[in-house]
Amino acid sequence: MHIFSLQFVGRPVLLAVLAATPIIARSQQSAPTTQIVLHAARLLNVENGTMLQPAEMLVEGERIREVGQTVAHRTGVQVINLGDTTLLPGLIDAHVHLFLHPGAEDLQTVEESVPWRVILAEQAAKADLLAGFTAERDMGTEGAGSADTAVRNAIDQGIVPGPRMRVSGNAIDILGGHEDANHYNPAQHVLSNADYANSAEQVVEVMRDQHKQGSDFAKIYETGPDRMVDGELHSPYQYTAAQLAAAVEEAHRLGTVVAVHAMGEPGTMYAAQAGVASIDHATQLSDATVRLMREKGIFAVPTFAIFEYFAHHRSSAAEAAREGALLDYKIHEFKKQVAAGVQFAVGSDVGPFPHGTQGRELELMVQYGMKPLAVLQADLINGAKLLGWEGQIGQLKAGYLADIIAVPGNPLDDISAVERVKFVMKGGVVARQ
């Protein structure tokens, strides 16, 4: 199964590769084995960084029953020996786009039907699961409305394979905002990739409609378009703090949360004042914003992988230079955020780059200043909190859902091991072996 060759192939080949991996469909459609024992050289306790050596786990149904150097081997139990690997909780990507693939994002909305995009989204979910991501947050369908609700439900019912999903439907945006069709002929009335809301009242109305259609949370565009001027980021805001606060209040009424796309000030400050759940991209955070985020438990989701991809995949040298300058600025600011104690979750913004390759995000966060254990804690412990599954996923403990991966070697020594996943189990069902 050549999952890591995905980044080197075009979309037609990508679909062929994924279609050639039938094991997961069979596994998803069958009931979990009553009891499975996983044996590996190591198991990482993500909470405290200790390594259990050797390690075994007893999985019963969809949950972990026992963890130790040895566990009970009852008659008839299936034993899977994973050799010289480290057992980890299934990875969490808090910022994905199942409905996007490499290529012009705006044209995908214009040229591709929603049914076709749903088919591609199913394949994207499958690729992400096979890469070890057992839980994800889909941050906007980019013009496909509530179609992500159908994909989430199909995954939950075992109809198609994929991670556990939290979905938003379309993002929410102002007229002429970040995801509006600003560069097309106005006479053609090309639709926005987001749902319009130009006031607090309209934001609330859109959120209610999205919730009715099955959304788990609201994604709001708070900044854009962004540009670098003389080495500084200029990031216009789209909603006031009061408007965002109205969205957060409505989300609380609905039992959900708000996540924002926000690159810089003052939009990041407005988002923190409103009490959103996460600030995604979070390239520029003032000292005052960082203090508020710490006080309110707001996560920053850096999404380095998409910035790196854009810096290396532009059609002209000038565009590449602009993206490179933005990435350099982001790295510089990120190091200050790490030193200031910002709480991070891990999200890659995968979609514009190939699904199933987003383990790179964890490697970049280590490369730019975090320790491997801190990145894994951000991904697994903070990610579980952000997605609303705290106490269910993100750790290998008795009673937790059996979302488990095995990676070669020791990820505390080489975090890139998470890009070479050898085994995936989700909810007690083997997805990759």
Image (cartoon, rainbow, N blue to C red):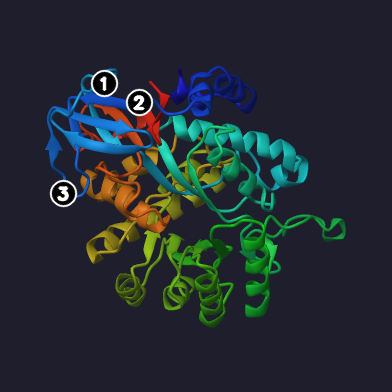
Residue 164 x/y as whole percent: 47, 43
Q: Is residue 319 left or right of residue 412?
A: right
What's under tag 1, amino acid-wise?
Leu
Relative to 279, does residue 419 appear above or below in the rendering?
above
What residue type is disc 2 on? Phe
**Among the two numbered marks 3 and 1 on one chain, the one whose residue lies closer to the N terminus:** 3
Seen from the viewer's position, the closer of residues 283 and 199 is 199
Q: Quadrant of the C terminus?
A: top left
Residue under circle 3?
48
Q: Disc 2 marks which residue?
A: 423
Is label 2 in contact with label 1 (beta carbons under 8 Å)?
yes
Q: Are marks 3 and 1 in contact (CB under 8 Å)?
A: no
Numbered disc 1: secondary structure: loop
Q: Residue furthest front?
A: 75
Cα distance in 3D space between marks 2 and 1: 8 Å
- Above or below 351: residue 265: below
Can you tell which mark lies on residue 368? none
Where is residue 185 drawn, in percent x and y? 82, 56
Image location of residue 347, percent across then percent down: 42, 49
Q: Identify the residue under disc 1.
A: 82
Q: Can the viewer see residue 354 in this picture?
A: no
